Amino acid sequence: MIPESIKAKELYPRAVVPHILQWLEDKQAIVLVGSRQVGKTSLLYLLIQYLLAQKINPNNVFYFDLENFDHLNLLERGPDALIQSLRLEGADFKERIYLLIDEIQYLTHPTNFLKLMVDHHPLVKIICTGSSSLSIRRKFKDSLVGRKVVFEIFSLSFEEFLQFNNQTNLLRVFEQYRLSVLLQEEKLPPVLPDGYIHSLQNQFEEYCRYGGYPAVVLEPNLEKKLSLLSEIHSAYVRKDLSSLFTIENINAFNQLTQLLALGMGNLVNLNTLTTDLGISRPTLENYLTILENTFIIKRLRPFFRRKKRELIKMPKVYFLDLGLRNLMIKQFGELNIRPDRGALVENFTFIHLYRELPVLNELNFWRTKNGTEVDFVLQTPTTLGEQLLPIEVKYQTLKKPTLPSTLQSFLTAYPVTKAAVITKDCYGQSKSGDTRVLFLPAWLLGTVTS
């Protein structure tokens, strides 16, 4: 049964919900993974409300929170005991049963549980969440191929941030300014009125300072925002790190996160880090894997076709939430006075490119061995091979669209039809040979493709 508090809870929509709903009637278990406090539980509540709005029998919709020992103990007894319990609760097994499970990694054997439920109880649709992909992988003893579909849940995008802040007037203008739309249109839509631009810039700066965790976004008091971010980080250390992983040197681990935060968007030299932290290469690799699989960072690999001239190994690191990154270096100042504002906007761009990345597409950066670099290269497979979209971030005021020399170097090496430059306030386009180059204010990247 579903508690009345869940049915009545007022929730903001999330952009991922329509994608999840496409799998609602398939046999596979739906697994939602992401860091703590990104809204996975609220997504389960949204799906419950959707099911009830579709006139699904309320007796056939069940929610289990595995941080509740009673719920955990029931599911630990196995599928047969669970099915018997559902029958006693009034479930009608002539119709589909919807089972929503929060924090499935707390099960001792989640693989066996999901496999048995999917294979032997086809009328039971499972939708579950997990906070750590690494702990889930450790407990999922095989790949569950054909039995699960996984969605990575992020903190709020800039568009969702505006929605949570009830900026409906600003949201209305976004549809025609999406990057995917602008790339297809030869003629750009008109420049937005100054009032819209000023409002969007203010909202964008707040997002870059405090990030997109829903609870943080909804809290209007700045001091409380910082307290919430601190609590999210503390819960991550207490629950994910302490209970799920063995961290041999917690001081080195904390120093690593600070160094990565300070060097956000820079090349990561593993040899330098091992020396600075006084740890071995395998330990460093393990710590980076933990940070990546608990949704704190992502490593971005270089794009290359010419091994003798281009970087092929050394990655960059970006953070998946800017508020958490700023907490790690204790910097929340206004964007225009910060020396790291360019890195913040570059990371903002990464977040919104990465989160909208289609399955077969790939995101990289490009750098030659003499230091020439383009921030992002989006690779899209086509019937004729691949399509490249280079994107350079130049967070500065431009009086007119001016092609950066680094982007010109890429276009010389790899002739493409389209490219983009992300700026502070320049909006327009230019031509470089056969390449059409878009110039867009950074806040327009809040709606990339979806």
Image (cartoon, rainbow, N blue to C red):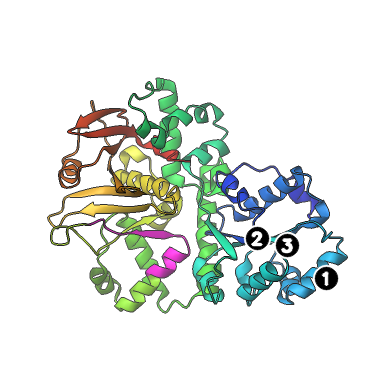
Q: Residue at x 39, y 23 (%)?
A: 189
Please state if 120 lies on the left or on the right of 265 as rendered. Answer: right
Q: Residue at x 71, y 50 (%)?
A: 48
Q: Are marks 3 and 1 in contact (CB under 8 Å)?
A: no
**Does residue 408 sit above or below 369 in this rendering?**
above
**Does residue 449 sit above or below 290 in this rendering?**
above
Q: Disc 1 residue type?
A: Gln
**Residue 429: % across, % down:** 27, 28
Counting every numbered tag in the picture gives 3
Q: Disc 3 residue type?
A: Val
**Residue 381: % across, % down:** 35, 50
The range drawn in magenta is 288-304
> Looking at this view, is 379 or 75 the one in front?
379
Would you name the residue on which mark 2 appears? 27
Task: Say few, some or many: other residues with alpha carbon within 10 Å of mark 1 (under 14 / 14 to 19 / 20 or more).
Answer: few
Please state if 429 lies on the left or on the right of 212 as rendered. Answer: left
Dot 2 falls on a residue whose secondary structure is: loop
Task: Say few, some or many: other residues with alpha carbon within 10 Å of mark 3 (under 14 / 14 to 19 / 20 or more).
Answer: many
- Nearest to the eye among marks 2 and 1: give it: 2
Mark number displayed over residue 124: 3
Would you name the residue on which mark 1 appears? 84
Tell me, yes or no, if residue 219 can be seen here. no
**Does residue 393 sit above or below 150 in this rendering?**
above
Q: Disc 2 residue type?
A: Lys
Spatial CA span between label 2 and label 1: 21 Å
The picture quadrant where one finds residue 312 is: bottom left
The picture quadrant where one finds residue 427 is: top left
> Looking at this view, is 389 or 340 the one in front?
389
